[in-house]
Amino acid sequence: MLSPIFRAQGVHKHFGPVHALKGVDLDIYPGEVHALIGENGAGKSTLMKVLSGAHLPSEGQLFMIGEEFIPSDPQHARESGIAMIYQELTLAPHLTIEENICLGMEQSFINKNFAAKIQDALDMLGQDHLSPNTKVSTLPIGTRQLVEIARAIVNDAKIVILDEPTSSLSTADTKALFKVMNKLRDQGVALVYISHFLEEVQEISDRYTILRDGQSCGSGMIEDITVQRIIELMVGRSMDDMYPRMGHEITEEILSVSNLAGSPLPKNVSFKLHKGEILGIFGLVGAGRSEAMRVLFGLDPMESGQIKMLGKTYKSMSPAKSLKNGLDFLSEDRKAEGLAQGMSIAINTTLSSVKGVFINLKDELKLAGTWAIKMRTKCHSVEDPISSLSGGNQQKVALARMMYHNSQILILDEPTRGIDVGSKSEIYAFIQELAQEGKSIIVISSYLPELQGVCDSLAVMYRGNLSPVRKIEDWDEHTIMEYATTGTNQEESA
């Protein structure tokens, strides 16, 4: 019988009073894709950082190829054949592919020409048109991810850990990545695949391990478990109602956008939004969904068009003007734009509502604590840095900031990207509650079931142009995708 290439037995990890891992067991076999599944904060990232040498376990044992293994740091783990590819890629854009691959391994490469080996890795990954001298800054996101994998191949990795690798990829790039993963698996490489997209987990994985609250709560062959059962094990409860619907009244028009254009996108966007309405905007990558909302909020310049909001007409916008007039924006890039990573949970919760020069810190902490409870944010203290939270809990803080600011119109760009199933359901419920309160919400998403489950109405972007808005029940998946790929549909053409 095949022996595991890596084994974790009874692994614990403490961070002060926080018990992040509580006796986790994990077996990884060569030539398999092993899905590591769990909610944000379940311990997945901590376990992988233990495996990749970023953290030492507090208790428990690790074994690599049958021998006890204690990686002293990431360099040691990498030299032992473990490659970690993070969701936020660790490439230096101003350097070439070859220079990026050699980073951290200069001592191994000294006085050697590794260009041929790097080219072989690129060829294997289907990137034979690339040269090792290509600047990484010229590559699209999907290709940059393959460069990270090429680095693992060049370093003769036996285990490759992929943390949310498809969260920023198009459908085509995801398929290309899966093709590469299958090729590596066939060559005997073990791949650990961390993802919140359970449909993808079922498609690419051979085996699975589920973590909940720092403990292993299920493992086995992926073909022997349903998505519904995975969700139940992840969250510890039944998830029959993934998209909670709450009755809310849609009343008067609150926002009117006419012929909005930016540079280079959007080209022409017109729609009306009503009080209490949840409007979904769908489109393929590059269609201009996010660009349109950035122009609307004032993050990017408006080239032409007109915005009527709460009785006032605007020919240009700015974030300060938008916030002052009751329009708020949740960026899809919470790390770079949505949150101040160096500041505390409390400051991030109240930041856009600060008035004047002086801040009552006691009141700020009290308010932030109230919102943390309301949003069910998992944290030790609201004085902790926002960077200490998992992705899902960071997103809850970003939403808490918007709710505390109390704007009337909310733009949510990919509000559940990189977030676990349980947190997604909570965020869907928050959106419904906001609509009940009379807020108007625009939800941008690349995940159709989410829009169909949450929204009252929908419009589709195609090459910078927005379709007419229709009630959600007047759309089906076929019609939505037809609009997204052609800019029209057969009903309109008839």
Image (tube, rainbow, N blue to C red):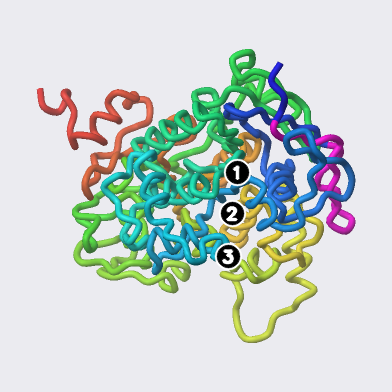
**Residue 36 tag number:** none
Q: Which residue is mark 1?
A: 430
Q: Are marks 1 and 2 in contact (CB under 8 Å)?
A: yes
Is 86 one of the magenta-colored residues?
no
Name the residue type under label 3.
Gln
Question: Percent position (x, y) of residue 28?
Answer: 68, 31
Residue drawn at x 30%, y 55% is 131
Dot 1 alpha-carbon crowd within 10 angstroms: few under 14, some 14 to 19, many 20 or more: some
| Residue to which mark 2 is pinned | 399
The answer to the question of whether label 3 and label 2 lie on touching residues, with beta carbons closer than 8 A, is no
Query: At label 2, which amino acid type do we have?
Result: Leu
* Residue occupying the point 65% across, 26% down: 208
3 or 2: tag closer to the N-terminus = 3
- Residue 437 vs residue 414: left or right? right
Mark nearer the viewer, 3 or 1: 3
The mark closer to the camera, 3 or 2, is: 3
- Residue annotated with mark 3: 107
Residue 73 position (above or below residue 85):
below
Quarter of the picture holding the C terminus? top left
Q: CA distance from mark 3 to mark 1?
A: 52 Å
Q: Where is the N terminus found, in terms of image quarters?
A: top right
The secondary element bearing badge 1 is classed as: helix
Numbered range of the magenta stretch: 5-23
Q: Earlier in the sequence, mark 1 or mark 2?
A: 2
